[in-house]
Amino acid sequence: MKHLLCYRRFEALMISSTDDPEDKAAKEEINKTEKYLKDYSAIKAEIDSAFMNIKDNEGLNAKMSEISKKHEGNPLIDEYIRVAGLQKKAKDAQEELSSYTDDGFKAKEELKDLGKSGSDPATIQAKQKMINDIEKKQAEKKMDIEAFKKEVLDAEKKMKEQMEKMKKDSADNMANL
C-alpha cells in the first residue's frame, strides 16, 4: 500500500474492465479528486494574476467565467474565484475609504480657512455638513471592509476544510482498494 501511495503521486489509477464496481467507483473518485487538486494548484496563480491585473469588471468577469467553464465542476476553483472576488471587494472598499479620508482632511482644512476668514455662516454650515457626510461614509466603509474580511476568512476556512475532506476521502478510498 505504501508503494501504491508513492506511485499514486505520479500516475492516475488505471481503471480496468475487470475491476469490481466498488473499486472502479473508488478509483474514479480518487482520480477526480486528484484532478481537482492539481487543477486548483495550477490555476490559482492565474486567478490571482487576473484579479490583480484586470481592472475593468467586465473583462474580469469574462476571464473568471472562462476559467470556471474550463474547469467545470471543480468546487475548489469555483470557491477560490469567489474568495478572490471578496478580497477584491475588500481592497476596493479600502481604496474608497482612503479616498474618503483624503476628502475629509481637505474639507476640514477648508473649514478652518473659512472660519479664519470670517465667511458666511451658511457656507461654514454647508462645509460642516459635508464633513459629517464624509465621516458617515467612512464609518459605513469600515463596516463593509470588516464584513468582507470576515466573509473572506470564513470562505477560506470552508475551502480549506473542503480540501482536507477531499484528501481524507481520497485516502480512505485508496485504503479500501
Image (tube, rainbow, N blue to C red):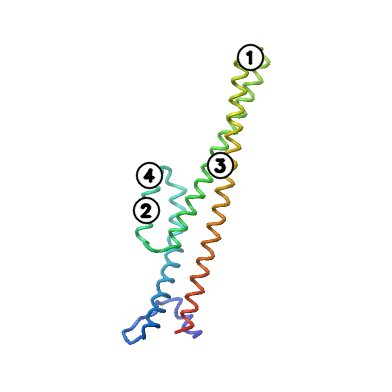
The percent position of residue 62, horizontal first and vertical second, equals: 36, 49
Whether label 4 touches label 3, CB < 8 Å: no
Q: Earlier in the sequence, mark 1 or mark 2?
A: 2
Q: Tell me the amino acid under the disc marked 3.
A: Gln
- Alpha-carbon span between mark 1 and mark 3: 34 Å
- Residue named by callout 2: 65
- Residue named by callout 3: 94
Viewer-nearest of discs 1 and 3: 1
Q: Tell me the amino acid under the disc marked 1.
A: Pro
- Residue named by callout 4: 58
Q: Earlier in the sequence, mark 3 or mark 2?
A: 2
- Residue named by callout 1: 121
Q: What is the crowding at mark 3: few (fewer than 14 residues within 10 Å), some, or many (at least 20)?
A: some
Q: Earlier in the sequence, mark 4 or mark 2?
A: 4
With respect to residue 81, does 117 lie above or below? above
Which residue, as the protein is rendered here, is positioned at the far bottom?
A: 18
The percent position of residue 101, horizontal first and vertical second, equals: 60, 33
Q: Earlier in the sequence, mark 4 or mark 1?
A: 4
With respect to residue 175, does 112 lie above or below? above
With respect to residue 43, does 23 lie above or below? below
**Secondary structure of the residue carrying numbered label 3:** helix
Name the residue: 62% across, 19% down: 125
